[in-house]
């Protein structure tokens, strides 16, 4: 009989656990026992495949909790749920690793200084239920959008706006969400959360937004200093558009990654344009970040931010920390300790500088979060914090509507 722990090969050889080929004298004995054993094994595998396929169908139709015993006793594990708009590479080394820390700083100390805080449990559960609904019943965000035209000198861009019921007659708070993606109409869970909490949800397609290839590159390198003035222009357009009977709306700014950087620039360089800001996965000091990053990252980011050695003044001009002394409104930052695209040290310096001036500033570092937080539990966690932050800073009741 073939030895245990040896895999038979179709060509008569065999792969041993150690990687070597079997002695020629054993091949004949192996061939002698192959037919019956292989037929038996293939029959078992075929039966298992049929049973697993049937079980998968039952699981998909909601009839979970079944197990197939005997040779097929391994349960079918459903794939992790994916939310609308999730990135296919959310678990790649490009966006999962370890956040940067300056030499001499203690990662553990930074985590202790800015710990994870749990949001309101009832609010988190409500958001999780809205997310799980996937727009089947709860779809205010699918209503027709308004495309607001905004001029900034010779530059014109659009702002896609969604408003909850009732905000056409009264002044409602507005949240400007910045991202690299071009705004699109239709259902999405993110605006759904904010609409149901009473916010007008705006997505400015400023320079740098990927609506066209040329527009996406319109804030690269030396263009970014001027392109950033779109943030200030967007705030003017939104306040003017949603002023009701002389009441100017409160205006918040938020975003992830690139949008988080935009958020911090809007809150620092253009202080006064926004009444509160929440930045996630953002960089506060681009020169410091690049100095901590690998040579590969520095080369990859040179066209977007600038060269660390050649463009020191440009990096200073586009970094939020440069304008930290201008801040006059509440700021919150959230970073993941497993996000290789941010520096925990830089965020700590930024927040401590704000607090030293008596500003309302906070930083939360989530040990298990990476750059792309797209699992349902991560989404509910982060958006519960976002809603708590903006409702408290704007003096609003923390209430999320759950009627269709």
Image (spheres, rainbow, N blue to C red):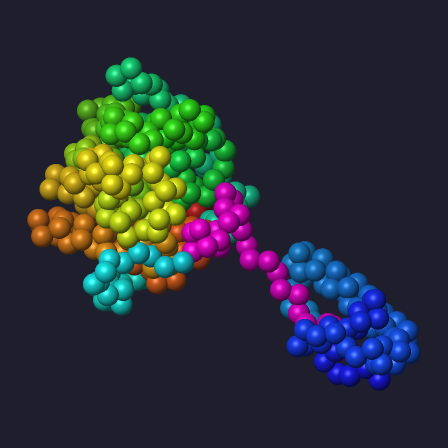
Residue 41: x and y in percent read: 83, 73
Is any atom of residue 403 visible in this view? yes
Residue lying farthest to the left in this orientation: 357
Residue 186: x and y in percent read: 50, 33
Is any atom of residue 165 visible in this view? no
Q: Nearer the viewer, residue 4 or 247?
A: 4
Task: Tell me if 73 is positioned left or right of 367 in this view.
Answer: right
Q: Residue at x 29, y 38 (%)?
A: 307
Q: Residue at x 15, y 43 (%)?
A: 324
Please provide the residue range marked out in magenta. Answer: 68-96
Task: Tell me if 328 is positioned left or right of 153 in this view.
Answer: left
Residue lying farthest to the front in this orientation: 24
Q: Quadrant of residue 312?
A: top left
Residue 217: x and y in percent read: 38, 28
Q: Nearer the viewer, residue 50 or 98?
A: 98
Q: Quadrant of residue 403?
A: top left
Task: Tell me if 343 is positioned left or right of 129 in this view.
Answer: left
Where does the N terminus fall, quadrant-wise?
A: bottom right
Q: Residue at x 68, y 56 (%)?
A: 61
Q: Residue at x 46, y 55 (%)?
A: 93
Question: Is 82 part of what is drawn in magenta?
Answer: yes
Question: Is 322 part of what is drawn in magenta?
Answer: no
**In the rendered view, would you say 329 is above or below 31?**
above
Main secondary structure found in the magenta portion: loop
**In the rendered view, would you say 62 is above or below 244?**
below
Residue 303: x and y in percent read: 35, 35
**In the rendered view, would you say 248 is above or below 116?**
above
């Amino acid at each position: 009989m073939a030895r245990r722990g040896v895999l038979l090969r179709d060509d008569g050889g065999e792969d041993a656990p150690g990687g070597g080929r079997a002695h020629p004298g054993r091949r004949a004995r192996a061939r002698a026992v192959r037919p019956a054993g292989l037929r038996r094994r293939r029959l078992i595998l075929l039966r298992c495949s049929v049973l697993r396929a049937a079980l998968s169908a039952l699981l998909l139709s909601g009839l979970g909790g079944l197990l197939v015993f005997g040779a097929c006793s391994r349960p079918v594990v459903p794939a992790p749920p994916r939310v609308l708009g999730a990135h296919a590479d959310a678990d790649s080394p490009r966006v999962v690793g370890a956040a940067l820390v300056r030499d001499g700083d203690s990662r553990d100390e930074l985590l202790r200084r800015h710990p994870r805080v749990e949001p309101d449990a009832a609010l988190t559960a409500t958001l999780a239920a809205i997310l799980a609904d996937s727009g089947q019943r709860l779809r205010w965000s699918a209503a027709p959008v308004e495309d607001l035209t905004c001029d900034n000198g010779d530059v014109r861009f659009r702002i896609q706006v969604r408003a909850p019921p009732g905000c056409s007659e009264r002044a409602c708070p507005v949240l400007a969400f910045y991202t690299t993606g071009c705004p699109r109409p239709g259902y999405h869970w993110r605006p759904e959360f904010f609409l149901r909490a009473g916010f007008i949800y705006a997505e400015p397609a400023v320079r740098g937004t990927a609506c066209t290839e040329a527009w996406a590159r319109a804030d690269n390198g030396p263009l970014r200093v001027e392109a950033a003035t779109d943030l200030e222009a967007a705030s003017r357009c939104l306040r003017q558009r949603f002023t009701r009977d002389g009441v100017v709306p409160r205006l918040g700014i938020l975003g992830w990654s690139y949008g988080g950087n935009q958020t911090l620039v809007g809150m620092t360089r253009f202080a006064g344009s926004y009444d509160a800001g929440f930045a996630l996965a953002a960089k506060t000091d681009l020169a410091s970040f690049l100095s901590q990053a690998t040579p590969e990252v520095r080369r990859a980011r040179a066209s977007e931010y600038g060269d660390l050695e050649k463009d020191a003044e440009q990096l200073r001009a586009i970094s939020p920390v440069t304008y930290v002394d201008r801040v006059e409104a509440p700021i919150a930052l959230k970073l993941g300790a497993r996000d290789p695209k941010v520096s925990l040290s830089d965020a700590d310096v930024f927040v401590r500088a704000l607090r030293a001036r008596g500003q309302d500033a906070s930083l939360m570092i989530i040990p298990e979060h990476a750059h792309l937080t797209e699992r349902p539990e991560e989404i509910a966690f982060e958006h519960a914090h976002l809603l708590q932050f903006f409702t408290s800073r704007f003096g609003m009741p923390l209430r999320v509507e759950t009627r269709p």
